[in-house]
Image: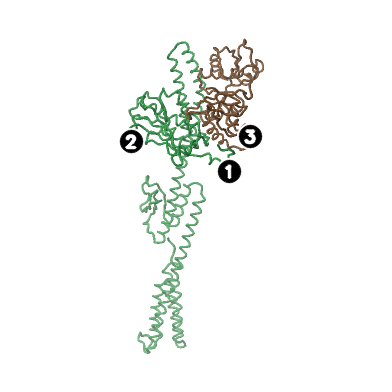
């Protein structure tokens, strides 16, 4: 799924969604799943038709079928490559209608939001308060110490709250690729950061792992 | 081996030697008046030596005795009698006889040694040529043919066959000699010699045959191993084909399953309650095919794994999260055990997160399936030496001892399991293979007080080790 335009749609206009899939049944299924969401659905059977329609219609969201030779194991890697390539989210077939609808809704909501590079107001992470401007993390009035790398990591996740940031993206932003392929540092730092943020290590509520893809930060209580 | 012992047939040497003896005697007789005893003795000795060289030791001795009689009868006075007048002549005569016999024996022995050495050289040459042939030919069967050919030629028998001990055909000739072929004390074949006359092997021929039958045994073993390797390769290719087939089926099922699920969802939204189970069954079908594919991939070592140092807590947390929808409200209690809980606040191990999560989900689902609904399932996390062990413990009926070895086999279902208990019996098989593919293990143990313990072990790691492995220091280790 890709949100090609940041421009917010006028509220009185329906949201336009373009579905590109070579299977007519799947296009119908996707469109009827979104029917209740106040969406107008356009269909394209292949990439060329899809590109033409995308240029003409300027859709708010594109649902694209990737005929990946996928399965568990391989496809989780592909998912990371997918997100790295600029997709905003993905679902794997066979997906359920409820899950699909929720993800589309989330993407449309995000696209409407004005992007803020770094929020100035302190943020809540459960019992913790993050003040990005002052670089402080406070739990019940007591400061929690973060190392410089842990801060970098937290900021990289905070820039895209609620969205999965891939291992590669995080590594690029925090280490500037200067350590080659040693992505395993990332997991070690995430483990330490999580220990400082989460109260229950077996049920994290803010720093969430997407196995094989990356991590995401959920803000709020 | 049928090599002649001396030059020409034996009888010819005898005839010629005695003819020479007669000739020398006649010549000496004509010159008797002018010759001394030494001349006569030397002339006879020459005949004896030539005779033994040509006809062997026995001829030499016979010539010595004949010459001795002639010497005495014709050349020692009184002539034409065996009486000897001068006692000193006795000395000459006996010395002649002894010299003749000893010389004949020595000559014959030297010849035998030379012959033996020649045969040894031949044997070595044959073995060497066979070794080279055996190594040079491409197919193991050709090596056996070459060995049989060399044996047949060397021993001069009509046929030499190398046969499997299991299917010995009837012997084709009246005279047969069979030698068992052994490798590591095990009979791998039979070497059969057939001939139209009785086969009698002299000691050197026997030695040669022993050496060659070892070659033959190695050849037979090579044929067997080659066949086994070809079979294994055929199996591997069949496995790959199967994996590719399941991958295609799995992939092609996804689109129709998506449609089925969506249509079932619509039906359910319209109030068709049964439609919900259509969606569930579609998921189950998808899960089953995915399991089959992974099992197949694990068997051929093709499941891609990204093994990295990661926190064990993360594995537990993502597993519990994934299980949340399927645990049917069952409680999973996580306990961190072991002495080093405070020493090492974060437990690290080396594993593939997505796949290990899968293995752990399978173990927990298994516990949910078989454990009583009112007992919580426990997950114990501990470090044991250089391993991290995750134990899933339930209070189910446990597993009878005779089934312990079977439960990790694919498609195994416990005896007396309800048919509706779900699953195709792949969960534990996949979990164990995933564990092993990561350098870990999965084992079963009865739980004290009743129930089962499934122990998933993964190689432990530390963050410090990571810095060491990559050769540089982590800038600000917390």
**Closest to the observer, B345 or B226:** B345
Q: Position of residue B340 (x, y in %)?
A: 45, 39
Q: Quadrant of the C terminus of chain B?
A: top right
Q: Position of residue A123 (x, y in %)?
A: 57, 24
Observer-side mark, 2 or 1, equals: 1
Which chain is in brown here? A
Chain ID, mark 2:
B
Mark carried by residue B401: 2
State whether discs 2 and 1 lie on one chain: yes
What's the CA distance linking mark 3 and mark 2?
56 Å
Mark carried by residue B418: none
Query: How many numbered dots are placed on residues in this image?
Result: 3
Chain ID, mark 1:
B
**Closest to the observer, A60 or A150:** A150
Chain ID, mark 3:
A
Which residue is tagged 3?
A176
Which residue is tagged 1?
B471
Q: Quadrant of residue A19?
A: top right
Observer-side mark, 3 or 2, equals: 3
State whether discs 3 and 1 lie on one chain: no
Q: Residue furthest front?
A: A141
Q: Position of residue B205 (x, y in %)?
A: 41, 59
Q: Is residue A83 visible?
A: yes
**Closest to the observer, A12 or B253:** A12
What's the CA distance linking mark 3 and mark 1?
18 Å
Q: Residue furthest bottom?
A: B86
């Amino acid at each position: 799924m890709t949100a090609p335009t940041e421009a917010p749609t006028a509220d009185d206009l329906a949201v336009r969604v373009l579905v590109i899939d070579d299977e007519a049944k799947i296009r119908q299924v996707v469109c009827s799943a979104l029917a209740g969401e106040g969406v107008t659905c356009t269909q394209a059977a292949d990439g060329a038709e899809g590109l033409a329609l995308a240029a003409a219609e300027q859709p708010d969201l594109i649902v694209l079928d990737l005929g990946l030779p996928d399965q568990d194991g391989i496809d989780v890697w592909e998912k990371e490559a997918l997100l790295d390539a600029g997709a905003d989210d993905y679902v794997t077939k066979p997906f359920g209608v409820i899950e699909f609808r929720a993800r589309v809704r989330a993407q449309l909501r995000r696209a409407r939001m004005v992007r803020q590079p770094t929020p100035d107001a302190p943020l809540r992470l459960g019992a913790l308060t993050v003040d990005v401007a002052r670089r402080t993390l406070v739990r019940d009035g007591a400061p929690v110490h973060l190392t410089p790398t842990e801060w970098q990591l937290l900021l990289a996740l905070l820039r895209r709250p609620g969205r999965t940031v891939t291992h590669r993206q995080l590594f690029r932003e925090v280490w500037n690729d200067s350590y080659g392929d040693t992505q395993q540092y990332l997991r070690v730092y995430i483990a330490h950061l999580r220990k400082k943020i989460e109260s229950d290590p077996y049920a994290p509520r803010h720093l969430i792992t997407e196995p094989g893809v990356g991590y995401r930060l959920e803000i709020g209580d | 081996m049928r090599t002649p012992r001396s030059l020409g047939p034996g009888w010819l040497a005898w005839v010629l030697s005695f003819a020479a003896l007669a000739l020398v005697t006649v010549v000496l007789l004509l010159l008797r008046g002018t010759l001394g005893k030494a001349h006569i003795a030397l002339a006879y000795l020459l005949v004896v030596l030539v005779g033994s060289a040509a006809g062997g030791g026995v001829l030499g001795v016979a010539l010595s005795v004949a010459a001795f009689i002639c010497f005495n009868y014709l050349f020692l006075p009184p002539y034409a009698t065996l009486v000897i007048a001068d006692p000193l002549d006795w000395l000459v005569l006996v010395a002649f006889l002894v010299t003749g016999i000893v010389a004949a024996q020595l000559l014959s022995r030297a010849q035998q040694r030379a012959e033996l050495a020649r045969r040894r050289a031949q044997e070595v040459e044959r073995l060497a040529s066979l070794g080279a042939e055996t190594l040079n030919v491409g197919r193991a069967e050709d090596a056996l043919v070459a060995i049989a050919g060399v044996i047949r030629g060397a021993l001069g028998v009509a046929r030499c066959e190398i046969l499997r001990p299991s299917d010995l055909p009837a012997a084709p000739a009246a005279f047969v000699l069979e030698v068992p072929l052994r490798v590591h004390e095990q009979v791998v074949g039979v070497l059969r010699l057939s001939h139209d006359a009785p086969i009698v092997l002299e000691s050197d021929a026997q030695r040669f045959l022993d050496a060659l039958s070892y070659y033959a045994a190695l050849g037979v073993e090579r044929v067997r191993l080659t066949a086994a390797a070809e079979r294994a390769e055929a199996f591997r290719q069949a496995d790959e084909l199967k994996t590719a087939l399941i991958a295609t089926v799995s992939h092609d099922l996804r689109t129709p399953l998506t449609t089925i699920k969506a249509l079932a969802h619509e039906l359910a939204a319209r109030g068709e309650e049964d439609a919900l189970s259509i969606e569930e069954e579609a998921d189950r079908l998808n899960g089953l095919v995915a399991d089959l594919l992974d099992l197949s991939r694990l068997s051929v070592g093709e499941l891609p794994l990204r093994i990295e140092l990661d926190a064990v807590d993360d594995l537990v947390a993502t597993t519990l999260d994934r299980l949340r929808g399927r645990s049917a409200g069952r409680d999973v209690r996580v306990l961190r055990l072991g002495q080093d809980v405070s020493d090492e606040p974060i437990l690290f191990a080396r594993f593939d997160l997505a796949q290990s999560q899968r293995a752990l989900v399978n173990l927990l689902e298994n516990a949910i399936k078989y454990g009583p609904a009112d007992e919580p399932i426990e997950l114990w996390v501990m470090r044991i030496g250089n391993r991290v062990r995750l134990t899933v413990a339930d209070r189910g009926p446990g597993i009878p001892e005779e089934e312990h070895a079977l439960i990790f086999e694919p498609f195994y279902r416990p005896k007396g399991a309800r048919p509706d208990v779900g699953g195709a019996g792949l969960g534990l098989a996949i979990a164990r293979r995933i564990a092993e593919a990561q350098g870990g293990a999965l084992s079963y143990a009865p739980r004290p007080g009743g129930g089962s313990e499934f122990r998933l072990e993964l190689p432990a790691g530390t963050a410090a080790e990571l810095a060491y492995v990559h050769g540089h220091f982590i800038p600000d280790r917390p």
